[in-house]
Image (spheres, coloured by chain):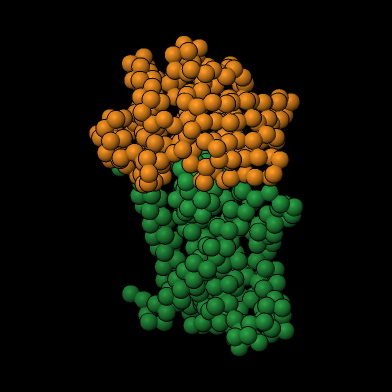
Chain colours: A orange, B green
Amino acid sequence: MSFDVDVGIRRGDAAIACRIEGDGLTVLFGPSGAGKTSVLNMVAGLIAPDRGHVRVSGETLFDAAIGLDVPPERRRAGYVFQEARLFPHKRVRANLLYGWRQGAGAIDVDETIALLGLAALLDRWPRTLSGGEARRVAIGRALLSNPRFLLLDEPLSSLDRARREEIMALIERLRDALGLPILMVTHDRGEAERLGKRIVEI
Amino acid sequence: MLTPEEWGIVALSLKVGGVAVAATLPIAFALAWLLARGRFPGKVLLDALVHLPLVVPPVVTGWLLLLAFAPAGPIGAWLQSWFGVSVLFRWTGAAIAAGVMALPLMVRAIRLSIEGVDRRLEQAARTLGAGRWRTFRTMTLPLSLPGVIAGVVLGFARALGEFGATITFVSNVPGETGTLPLAIYAALQTPGGEALVLRLAGVSVLLSLVALIASELIARRAGRGLHVL
């Protein structure tokens, strides 16, 4: 259960290159604009790298050398975007269940709702949620899609201190309980050092 | 209030307008999607062609339709040999003329709303396991619905009011192609037709008002589903 990522892409004048190897939680750390989100997008299959490969838990998702590019819907990434990206025309419940996939290792719906404290939010529309609530729904939605790996883009930004602590504890629990490879982006060194046993600077 | 003959004119207008919009909608949506999302050579040309009925005199559009659908024309010959039908002097021809004239307005409205759909939501749907078709069905389509409704209403209003292309293409055959505008025009040419003109004009205004109010209500309901409720 690990990442083996080595990708590079040119974006205008800037070149983004990144190498990630290992299991558990890897923190991608660097200043804004360094291309951290682009790396997550390449792992998720939303943008194609110019070169390199993406392998997760032994399965090749992208390999420039052999022209392999698995589409995002078949990569089974649990991607929590920096902005929650909840579907505005669906209630919280429908958002949570949009990618719901049962199967081996799948997390129980009720369990997820309890874990994230979403029970009271199920019938709300996304635009009535606070930033922290929306973030929790987005995390729940990603978890319920029964992902093979998690991509977390600044999951703690724009949250107040109490919520930060709560979400950080949740990420630690996910890291320890699910055993999924997690790739998390942050620009906060404190967060990076607390959560990641491996920090990749970009 | 209205005589059976006048009701016939109103019913024909609604039928022609309704069929024109219903048949044009899928084409308009496909074109709007292509123009909003597609990247292909000749896009500017396609854009210009779609808008042509908006800027060309309707008489010219009607004449071009006549050339195309005449028994010896490219589409007319095909319809004749395969289905044994002709749309000339028929209400179907009037619907084609109305649909062609409504097309640019519908494409414009729908294209704008497709361009307004947040593509990051579609990306999120993809990462959650939705393929292209499911993403289109559950994200692109419902999120662009307000523009589709606006396009339908605009198109229907345009189709109801269609005159120049229709009279050039399929002429004014009472009961077949004689929609409201054509019937009003014919009544104006007839001595003593003023009373008929007044009543038909009144109906036209009423129909347009109803369509506008209905669209407003539908848009509000759709908007509520999108946001609050």
Determine the image quadrant of residue A165: top left
- Quadrant where the image shows the C terminus of chain A: top right
Establish if A141 lies above or below B88.
above
The location of residue B172, given as percent across then percent down, is: 57, 80
Residue found farthest to the left? A120
Q: Residue at x 37, y 46 (%)?
A: A103
Visible residue check, residue B162: no
Q: Nearer the viewer, residue A112 or A98?
A: A112
Q: Nearer the viewer, residue B146 or A107?
A: A107
Q: Residue at x 35, y 24 (%)?
A: A173
Residue found farthest to the top? A190
Q: Would residue B4 appear left or right of B178 to someone viewing this image?
A: left
The location of residue B123, given as percent across then percent down, is: 52, 41
Q: Residue at x 46, y 76 (%)?
A: B12
The location of residue A108, given as percent across then percent down, is: 30, 40
Visible residue check, residue A176: yes
Establish if A80 lies above or below B16.
above
Q: Would residue B183 appear left or right of B74 to someone viewing this image?
A: left
The location of residue B167, given as percent across then percent down, is: 61, 75
